[in-house]
Amino acid sequence: MKRHTEQFVGALFRVLADEGHDEVQKRLLESYHSKASIDRDELAANMFSELVTVLHQHLDTRDEIDVLTTATRHLLNRFSTVIGVVPVAIVVVDAAGQVQLWNEGAERTFGWSESEILTQSYLETLSPPPDLAETVRGRLEAGERLDGVETRHQHQDGSILDVRLWAAPLSHRESGFGGAAFVVSDITEQKQREQRLAVLNRVLRHNIRNDVNVVQGHLDMLIDSLPENDEHANVIQRRLTNIIELSDAARYVEQLQSDGMRSFATLDLGALLRTRLDRLDSEYPNAEIHATMPESLRVAAHELLPYALDNILENALKHNDSGVPHVTVDVQTEDDDRRTIRIEDDGPGLPETEREVLTTRTETPLTHSAGMGLWLASWILRHSGGDLTVEDGQSGGTRVTIQLNAPPQ
């Protein structure tokens, strides 16, 4: 059922009940029940047509006009209330681009009051980039909707705001294009925060890399004069490796934050897993790794998915202190839309803090894990539209189940 038609029919039902037109309401209800099995859109059209017919049959002209006017007023009051309280800017313009509606959210966002902005040109007053203004106008006149377009608007005080806007064209019976409705959200603080974090991230990574390279160079010279497998040198080397991995993880976090859906790709899950399992075979020669998976199986995921798989697979082995660690990897196609990966080990079990990392969305002091690897793996999988669960394995270890989406057809 078309939403606006459904709302109007509902408003008429309420008005008929409030004003005591019980017989008319009864006839409409009987008509509704007799047609309730048909398509919702068709039902809306039939109900509206039936409603007008019944009103003509049972009400005189004055009462009919009164009912329709009251129902319309109820809907307009509800609409005005919603427009007034939403925290974002809502702007409606006519076919010439002049502002016809300017809500309180728009006043708070851009500084101009309704009386100052009405009949002014929306795009000229808020001064988005000229090329974008033309694109927005052209797309709306062509009947397109705009969904989350990022641009800049000018505040009344002259400052520039980063905004994200949604817009839809309004139709006119004679000319076709009758204007447009805009919803605009101020994302200036969000953009500034992202920029500061990105700069801080890059500066810190650069400085860390430089310092690590210096320390690594001195360590290499010291190792030449130390006994083979010196414990202190090995500890320093492991710590340097951890710092480099942490720097890489910070870069991946920044990429996740900035790229969004742009970094989605179709990946061959079979090839990715075989490459990683071959490497783990050589790094953990005492381990027994058993894999059951198709030769090739494609998934739609963030391009950082290999990093997430690395962390989860390696975590299954590096904390296993048994003489012969066992890991099984099973890949299944549950249906045409989902791929399932089950990774199970026979280790001591995932500590509660690490388990919470994989199953919760935020890190708190109570879920502070030792490193960023599992956190990043969890974020990558969620950015990929995947699901992840952790449970006890059959052999006392841990079973991690990952579900990913198949590529769109």
Image (cartoon, rainbow, N blue to C red):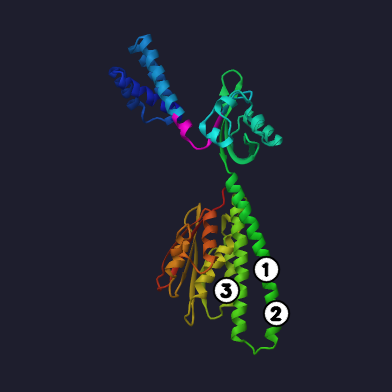
Amino acid type, label 3: Leu
The x, y position of residue 202, in whole percent, is 66, 60
Disc 3 is placed on an element classified as helix
Q: Which residues are magenta?
A: 81-91
Establish if 46 lies above or below 241.
above
Q: Residue at x 35, y 25 (%)?
A: 32
Establish if 1 lies above or below 19.
below
Nearest the viewer among 359 and 220 is: 220
Residue 281, quarter of picture? bottom right
Residue beneath label 1, please?
209
Between discs 3 and 1, the one toward the N terminus: 1
Distance of mark 2 from mark 1, alpha carbons? Answer: 14 Å
Establish if 19 lies above or below 90.
above
> Are there few (<14), some (14-19), or many (20+) residues within 10 Å of tag 3?
some
Residue 10, quarter of picture? top left
Mark 2 and 1 residues: CB-CB less than 8 Å, in contact?
no
Between discs 3 and 2, the one toward the N terminus: 2
Between discs 2 and 1, the one toward the N terminus: 1
Amino acid type, label 1: Arg
Residue beneath label 2, please?
218
Residue beneath label 3, please?
280
Q: In this rendering, which labeled residue sits more in front, label 3 or label 1?
A: 1
The x, y position of residue 60, in whole percent, is 35, 9
Q: Residue 165's mark?
A: none
The x, y position of residue 294, in whole percent, is 54, 63
The x, y position of residue 167, in whole percent, is 58, 33
